[in-house]
Amino acid sequence: MNKQNNIDSLGTLVRLRSTEVERLQADLARQEATRARFQNSVERLTDLAVGSGPSGALSPVLAANCGNYKQAVFALADSHRTDLHLHEANMAVSQRKLAQAWTRRELLGKVLAQQEDALAREQDRAQRKRDDEIATQSWLAGRADQQ
């Protein structure tokens, strides 16, 4: 495999890794939006339960109803908190995956840059050699004409 094919292959790998990083970033953004919705939901449910007022001043039937309502809302808020914590744990895993994918992409990018630089130096060296050979031939031809 020649160096240009190697560089083309590395370029393709870097683009694939970039696509993977972009996909993981989009996934993490969606997860962040879901986390924000969970957080808002927990806050609203807590506000609903607290805002329903004290149940002690009500008749026994209404107090029981209000108590049951508060209990149900607090239970729902707890359920949402649990889901939020599980979701945040999944987000942490996604963040690690994103960091690993980004590192792989950066490393491949550095290897690609090194390969491109090496090829450019090699091509420049070959061009200088050709130029030197042409100059030498021209000089020798000029000397032969003078004699």
Image (cartoon, rainbow, N blue to C red):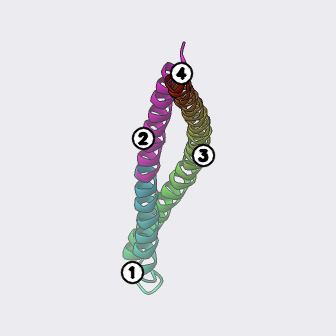
Which residue corresponds to the image point at 55% horizontal and 21% vertical from the top-left?
Answer: 3
Q: Is residue 46 above or below residue 143?
A: below
First in sequence: mark 2 or mark 4? 2
Per the image, the residue denoted by label 2 is: 23
Of badges 1 and 4, nearer the viewer stands 4
Per the image, the residue denoted by label 1 is: 59
CA–CA distance between discs 1 and 3? 58 Å
> Quadrant location of residue 59?
bottom left
Q: Are marks 2 and 4 in contact (CB under 8 Å)?
A: no
Is 71 displayed left or right of 121 in the figure?
Answer: left
Find out whether residue 56 is within the magenta segment.
no
Per the image, the residue denoted by label 3 is: 99
Which residue corresponds to the image point at 38% horizontal and 72% vertical from the top-left?
Answer: 61
Of badges 2 and 4, nearer the viewer stands 4
Per the image, the residue denoted by label 4 is: 144
Q: Are marks 3 and 4 in contact (CB under 8 Å)?
A: no
First in sequence: mark 1 or mark 4? 1
CA–CA distance between discs 1 and 2? 57 Å
Of badges 1 and 3, nearer the viewer stands 3
